[in-house]
Image (cartoon, rainbow, N blue to C red):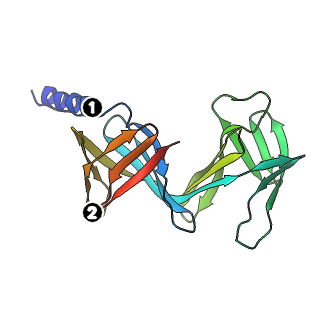
């Protein structure tokens, strides 16, 4: 009987999660230094989250160089030497290998799409993500530490439980690719964009 009850509760909880909520989201508003966060809502009521760098920037390609904005307000543009290993692997500056995620989106512009590259922080091996659009816009996501949490939805209210902090509970809404959720303590709201 207990197994059946647990299964029924799990099915009921999963049925209340709107299909548009599951997936990957990142902060729209960030600090002046580009700090924000990333959330991944799973359809079983669990989530993964990490604070990190969320940087939108323009890019262009000149010959065999990927050109990005300056790292500081008065610095020079960043010029990354590109070498294609194959259509799904790109070597930057001879040391960082980017691997394509998913199918090649644009046969005329090989860099368009999502890319990952490994990087290490003290005590953790993580992945940085680059997104290149065909219109010269890019997004860089650098998670600092992925953690697990839980969430539940009842009507238009969401409750998000993060370890070692107060739960975030309050109204949420999805409008196109923008998700609005409460912050811890429920005093403010945070907006995220699907990625």
Q: Which residue is depicted at the point 77% across and 34% down?
A: 110
Instruction: Give the residue drawn at x 49%, y 53%.
Output: 28
Q: Quadrant of the N terminus?
A: top left
Front position in the image: 48 or 160: 160
Figure quadrant of residue 7: top left
Q: Which residue is mark 2?
A: 187
Note whether 38 is above or below 15 in the view shown: below
Depth check, front residue: 189 or 42: 189
Out of 53 and 73, give the one closest to the viewer: 73
- Left or right: where does residue 5 sit relative to residue 80? left
In the rendered view, tell whether residue 47 sits above or below residue 176. Answer: below
Label 2 sits on a secondary structure element that is loop
Q: Which mark is residue 81?
A: none
Q: Which residue is situated farthest in the bottom direction here?
A: 74
Look at the numbered discs 1 and 2 and tell me whether their residues touch, using CB distance below 8 Å. Answer: no
- Please state if 8 lies on the left or on the right of 66 as rendered: left
Q: Is residue 185 left or right of residue 46?
A: left
Q: Can residue 185 be seen? A: yes
Query: Residue 60: image x %, image y %?
Result: 79, 48
The answer to which image quadrant residue 43 occupies is top left
Q: Position of residue 79 (x, y in %)?
A: 82, 58
Q: Residues within 10 Å of mark 1 (few under 14, many from 20)?
A: some
Describe the element under mark 1 as helix, strand or loop: helix
* Percent coordinates x, y for residue 150 in the rendering: 30, 47
Question: Dot 2, how many residues are within 10 Å of its Cα: few (below 14), some (14-19), or many (20+)?
Answer: few
Query: Measuring 48% from the left and 46% from the top, which residue is drawn there?
Result: 193
Where residue 93 sits, quadrant-wise, is bottom right
Q: CA distance from mark 1 to mark 2?
A: 27 Å
Q: Nearer the viewer, mark 1 or mark 2?
A: 2
Identify residue for label 1: 14
Q: Does residue 145 appear anywhere in the picture? A: no
């Amino acid at each position: 009987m207990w197994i059946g009850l647990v299964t029924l509760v799990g099915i009921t909880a999963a049925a209340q999660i709107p299909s548009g909520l599951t997936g990957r989201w990142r902060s729209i508003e960030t600090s002046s230094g580009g700090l924000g966060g990333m959330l991944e809502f799973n359809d079983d009521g669990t989530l993964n989250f990490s604070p990190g760098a969320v940087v939108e920037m323009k890019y262009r390609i000149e010959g065999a160089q990927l050109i990005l904005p300056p790292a500081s307000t008065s610095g020079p543009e960043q010029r990354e030497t590109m070498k294609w290993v194959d259509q799904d692997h790109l070597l930057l500056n001879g040391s960082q290998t980017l691997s394509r995620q998913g199918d090649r989106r644009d046969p005329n512009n090989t860099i368009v799409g999502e890319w990952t590259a490994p990087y290490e922080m003290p005590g953790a091996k993580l992945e940085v993500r680059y997104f290149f659009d065909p219109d010269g816009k890019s997004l860089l996501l650098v998670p600092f530490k992925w953690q697990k949490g839980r969430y539940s939805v009842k009507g238009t209210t969401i409750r998000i439980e993060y370890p070692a902090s107060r739960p975030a509970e309050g109204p949420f809404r999805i409008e196109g690719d923008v998700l609005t959720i409460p912050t811890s303590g429920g005093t403010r709201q945070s907006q995220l964009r699907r990625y």
